[in-house]
Image (spheres, helix red, strand yellow):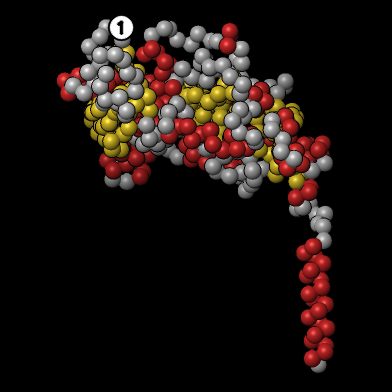
């Protein structure tokens, strides 16, 4: 009996070992998968179709230490009626099954976004392989061209660049970590609207820089993707936000407006502003501001009209230094602080009126402050917040306390 049990055990162990170390050639084998790292969606030559581009990683090139996007990935495009028809055709073309579990970006062209992208968003979010943390971008150029231009200059792999570039929002505020999960929530809720990263391309030739603003330093915040004065090796940039009402693109935010958006959501750790020097004409001061506390909003409904108050507080450091500036003088610092406070109040106020009057889209989520004003959810829904938001009035209170610079305290 013991001999029989031993033989059964040895047989089972042999089967397990053979299965564990033998090559698998099923459809689930990694050898039969092609990993998509970015998807681009453009309008097809036939207006009812889409051009879907897949950026696919090349594992063999990565393992050999490839250093450019051209060596680590390929981009294939197919025109068809839907995303999943495109996936099915691409599976046949490349002889492998596309896998979306490592997809970092979904890029829509501006033309597609203007027509509406709800079908594509619902389709992608319905796929268990697509992660809700996948970033969503609206490109002012063709989506395929944007992906081709996104060649990382400081990273070896495009996947690494796609993963880390939204982090710049924390210390510049010029973009935001907009994900497909957030976009889907904005589509399905009745208290907010969706948004996406605004992408574009740059001219690599410094002699052909775009004149995006006048020589006035105060206009630097008007920059946005496809309109900046940047020249560099990487051909893509991400500055500003694309604003949606429902599933349709209705407008764009500049760099400074995106800072205001991030402040309203308390998603920025610090940001740079340029203000007039209160003691010297035609001179400017660069300040780096840090939120001293969370920005808070309050909404009152008076005669059916929303009256919104925003309170924010910042500490600041002087970045630009010049000779003979008395940056330890409390009177000087008080004047700079007051000028900065007025500047922030103006910028946030202009931004809020733009979202309500021009774009008619509450991407700030003020509705969460309104819910408690109504006894029931049905009463709130009858009020129709998203329609009434465009009638809002705003009051912004900003308190900025500017200290001297970091290393130079007086010149």
Give the side of residue 330 with respect to residue 262, left or right: left
Nearest to the observer: residue 357 or residue 408? 408
243, above or below 65, in the image:
above
296, above or below 355, in the image:
below
Give the side of residue 309 with respect to residue 78, left or right: left
Q: Residue furthest bottom?
A: 1
Q: Is residue 85 visible?
A: no
Residue at position x 48%, y 26% in the image: 241
Secondary structure found at label 1? loop
Q: Quadrant of residue 75?
A: top right
Residue at position x 58%, y 44% in the image: 131
Which image quadrant: the C terminus? top left
Residue that badge 1 annotates: 282
Nearest to the observer: residue 141 or residue 382? 141
Which image quadrant: the N terminus? bottom right
Q: Quadrant of residue 152?
A: top right
Residue at position x 82%, y 57% in the image: 23
Q: Residue furthest left?
A: 331
Q: Position of residue 191 (x, y in %)?
A: 40, 37
Give the side of residue 70 with respect to residue 340, left or right: right
Give the side of residue 298 with respect to residue 11, left or right: left
Q: Is residue 161 visible?
A: yes
């Amino acid at each position: 009996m013991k001999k029989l049990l031993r033989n059964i055990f040895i047989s089972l162990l042999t089967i397990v070992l053979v299965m564990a170390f033998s090559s698998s050639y099923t459809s689930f084998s990694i050898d039969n998968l092609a990993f998509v790292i970015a998807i681009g969606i453009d309008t097809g030559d036939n207006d009812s179709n889409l051009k879907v581009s897949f950026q696919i990683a090349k594992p063999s090139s990565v393992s050999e230490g490839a250093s450019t996007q051209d060596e680590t990935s390929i981009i294939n495009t197919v025109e068809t009626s839907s995303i999943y028809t495109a996936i099915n055709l691409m599976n046949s073309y490349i002889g492998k099954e596309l896998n979306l579990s490592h997809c970092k970006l979904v890029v829509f062209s501006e033309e597609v976004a203007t027509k509406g992208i709800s079908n594509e968003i619902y389709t992608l979010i319905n796929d268990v392989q697509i992660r809700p943390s996948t970033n969503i971008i609206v490109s002012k150029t063709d989506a395929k061209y944007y992906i081709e231009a996104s060649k990382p200059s400081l990273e070896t792999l495009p996947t690494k660049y796609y993963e880390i570039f939204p982090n710049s929002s924390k210390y510049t505020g010029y973009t935001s970590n907009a994900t497909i999960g957030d976009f889907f929530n904005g589509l399905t809720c009745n208290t907010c609207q969706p948004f996406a990263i605004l992408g574009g391309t740059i001219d690599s030739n410094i002699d052909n820089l775009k004149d995006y603003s006048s020589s006035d330093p105060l206009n630097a915040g008007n920059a946005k993707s496809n309109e900046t004065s940047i020249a560099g090796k990487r051909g893509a940039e991400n500055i500003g936000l694309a604003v949606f009402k429902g599933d349709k693109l209705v407008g764009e935010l500049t760099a400074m407006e995106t800072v205001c958006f991030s402040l309203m959501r308390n998603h920025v750790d610090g940001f740079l502003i340029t203000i007039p020097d209160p003691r010297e004409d035609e001179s400017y001061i660069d300040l780096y501001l840090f939120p001293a506390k969370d920005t808070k909003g309050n909404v009152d409904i008076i005669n059916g009209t929303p009256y919104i108050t925003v309170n924010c507080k910042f500490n600041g450091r002087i970045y630009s230094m010049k000779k003979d500036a008395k940056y330890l003088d409390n009177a000087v610092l008080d004047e700079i602080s007051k000028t900065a406070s007025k500047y922030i109040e103006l910028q946030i106020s202009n931004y809020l009126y733009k979202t309500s009057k021009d774009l008619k889209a509450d991407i700030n989520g003020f509705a969460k402050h309104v819910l408690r004003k109504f006894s029931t959810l049905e009463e709130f829904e009858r009020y129709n917040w998203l329609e009434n938001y465009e009638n809002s009035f705003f009051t912004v209170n900003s308190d900025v306390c500017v200290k001297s610079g970091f290393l130079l305290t007086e010149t």
